[in-house]
Each structure stands twice: as C-alpha cells, then as structure tokens.
Image (cartoon, rainbow, N blue to C red):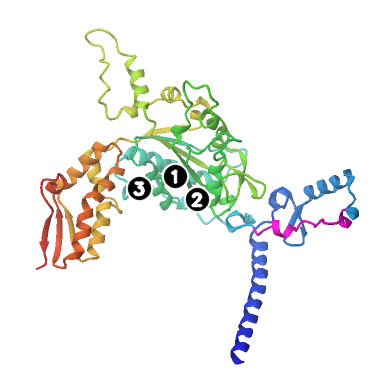
Amino acid sequence: MSDDKEYMDTQDELLKKSDSDPVEHDKEDKEEYEKICFLCRRPESKAGKMIDLPNHIHICSDCMQKSFDAMQNSNINYNDLMNMPNVNMMDLSALQDRIPQNQKIKKKKEKKVEEKPALTIKDIPAPHKIKAQLDEYVIGQEHAKKVMSVAVYNHYKRILHPQSEDEIQIEKSNMLMIGPTGSGKTYLVQTLAKLLDVPLAITDATSLTEAGYIGDDIESVVSKLLAAADNDVERAEHGIIFIDEIDKIAKKKNTNQRDVSGEAVQQGMLKLLEGSEVEVPVGANSKNAMVPLTTVNTRNILFICGGAFPDLEVVIKERLNKQSSIGFKADLKDKYDNDPNILDKVTVEDLKTFGMVPEFIGRLPIIFTLQGLSVEMLVEILKKPKNAILKQYKKLLALDEVKLDFDDGALEAIAKLALAKETGARALRAIIEEFMLDIMYEIPKDDNIGQVIITREYIEHTGGPQIILRG
C-alpha cells in the first residue's frame, strides 16, 4: 500500500512539472522570440502586431482581414456548416505544432543611444596580426593570406564605422580566390572562422539552381549564415559567406538545354553580392508554407568565392600564345606549358571565356590565386601547422608511451607520393594512413617498444621502420 502511495505521489509531481514547463517555455519564447503569423509565416517585425488566438496561434491583421473578406464574398453560412452531419472542424492546434528551435526568429535588441559598441575600431586586429594567426595553421600562400587579412580588416572597419549620408560610403570588397584542388582555399576560410568574431557560413555552389527547380534556392546561402548567427538577423548582416566550387556555376558551352544551374544562378546572385534585402527561410534551405521567413540585408555581408577552375590554364595559355609570332625572337608556343604559376596570369577576360558572366565578375573586384603545392611546401605542411597530421600521430602513440619520429628522407618521400596524386594536401593524409596502419596495429602488442622511426626505406617499400626497445 505504501508503494502505491509513493507511486501516486511521484506521478503527481511529474504532472505538476509537466504543467509548469510549457508555461516557462512560452514565457521564454514570448520574451526572446518573435511571433509568427500562422497563415503567411511572416514574423511580427515585418507583418505588424499579431492577433492572438487559442492554441498558440497568431494571425497578422492583413491575413485576418483577407479571411473576413473571403467569408463575406462566399455564400457558405457558418451556422449551416456547423449543423451539417459528419463534418468535424479542423483542429488548428494539431497543425500549429511548436516551431523548432532552429526556425525561431530572435527579436532585435533595442539600440540605446548612450550604449557603446563592445568592439571599437581601435580593437580591430591589424592585418599583420590576422596573417600571423593564419601562419600558424596554413603553410605558404603568402599573397592569399595577405589579401584575406586586409579584406577582413577593412570589413571590420566598415561595420564599426558609423556612416551617414553626407560622408564617403565605404563599399565592401568581395573576393574571388582561384587555386588548384588541395591548395588550401577552404582551409583558409575555415581557419578564419576560428579566429574571427563575426559569423561565417561555408557553403558550396554545386547544389544551387534557378528558382523553381529541384535544388537549393540562391537565398539558401544567406539562410546558412543566419543559422550560424543563431537566427540573429542583425548579427548575420555583419557576417562573411564563403561560396566554394563557384566554378561549377559557369555558363555551359554547346548545350541546347536550359541552364538552370549555370548562368541562371550567376544572374540570380548579382543582387545578393551587391547588396539587397532578401527573404530567407529560417532553419531550412527552401521556402514552404510552414517555414517562417525573415528579411536579411546583404549590403554588409562579405562574400568570398572560391573554385579550382579546371582547364582555366588552357584558356590562359591560348590567350598568351596569341602573342607569339614567327621569327628568331618570337615566343615559343610551348613556353607556358611547364609554368607552375600560370594561374597568376589570369585576367577578367580569361574568366569570361571560362564561362563566368561579366556582371558576376564585376561584383568580385578582388581576384587572387593560390599556388600549387611543391614538395618543399608539402613537407612543411606535414611538420609545422599547429594541427599537423604528424603531430596528431605522435600524440596518439604518446598515449601508448611510445615516441614516434619521421626522418627527413621519409617526409620527402611522402611529399613526392602526394605530389604524384595531384590532389594537393588532401593526399598526405591518405598516404600516411596507409603506412601507419600496420604500425598502429602492431605497437600495442608489445610493451617493450619505446620508439619508432619511420624511414625512407619503409615509405619506398625497400625496408622497414626502425624500432627501439625500452632501456
């Protein structure tokens, strides 16, 4: 009997707790998040004051007026509808499920005149400090790191400097980075994401299509930035968007089909890059009837576009070879065939020939290239960065109280194998994973092993690693 009483008391406590939680949840939502119209899905900041209905349903005045007009123009009598047999009224509470947390729109904080910004222009990290932080993670690409450091520095100043109508308006400088695969384009931006205090979204252009077709709408890139800013519109409007694989939306050549993922996407992104107010879905990639929408101004959003642009070297060589002529001092047609820095000679005309729309290129004023990686750079990538792959393996074996070393010959052999794969720094991990598999498997078997040295002979399959026992 006592057990039954304890069980009933526990159930009563759980019921009381479950009854109190929704109230606290609703109070929190009311204070922190905006109300969303049940019909048009616009937030209260855009649609105006909401009319509250039972079951947590909110209707804006426009939709309410349209509903009244529709009822007046229709010939259906509400009383007759209620008296009809086998007709059940729709349960709106079942449709109006609670909006998920990632689709709620936070209210904008009211600005106080006397309140000073947390970050001032004097507190902005200088370009050389930003580059110094990038140097700890990214090897080489000095020009690219310098360009990005200056662009981000100016972006901070542009955001924090109050601009009025009679002053000089500082325009944003969107960037286009060109480099072979594995040269560090995405990694540069990912490293910036860790160093900066502004929200940053990384997306790719491969899934973007013209509005109305299967795929992500163009506004989805802004929707991802909004999610990175925790649905804070004001903070998202000061963020950075990196669009990778931008070369995949180049204008298709020799095709009779509608180009829904090429030139059409470039045309649709023009206003986005320049700066405009776009309606984006909150917490989703595409618009539908049950996803709330909010308006984001892209004027202060810095866009960085990157791509490998395969076969762009061919376009550059064709342009340069047109300058060759016949004679003793003429340039040879194969002069640029073995030029490792051919991408440095890229011009806007080359990008137009590749398939990029002139209006699109015009909205990316800063164009810079990343160099292809050499053997020396690959060796540095193996050793120097803070999270270098060799340091990761050394730490893994250190947990087994085993010291791991690589001699210089082994590092050079690994770099040459990676260079032959032509996939840049991505090949390093695959090669080391292959050679370290047997070592990681065998080492825990023997507690007497104290040190392992990876040699060139082991990498070239002409010998084995050097193993030193404890003591």
Residue 468: in magenta span: no
**Where residue 247 sits in the image (x, y, percent)?**
44, 32
Q: Is residue 50 visible?
A: yes
Amino acid at the residue labelled 1: Tyr
**Where residue 168 sits in the image (x, y, percent)?**
56, 37
Disc 1 and disc 2 in contact, CB within 8 angstroms: no
Mark 3, residue position: 134
Distance between mark 1 and mark 3 Cα atoms: 14 Å
Q: Which residues are magenta?
A: 81-98
Which labelled disc corresponds to residue 131?
none
In the current view of this chain or complex, which residue is farthest to the bottom? 1
Q: Is residue 49 visible?
A: no
Closer to us: 63 or 253: 253
Instruction: Say which of marks 1 and 3 sits in front.
Output: 3
Q: Is residue 207 above or below residue 291?
A: above
Closer to us: 452 or 152: 452
**Where residue 134 sits in the image (x, y, percent)?**
35, 48
Q: Which residue occupies 81% across, 46% down? A: 66
Residue 94: in magenta span: yes
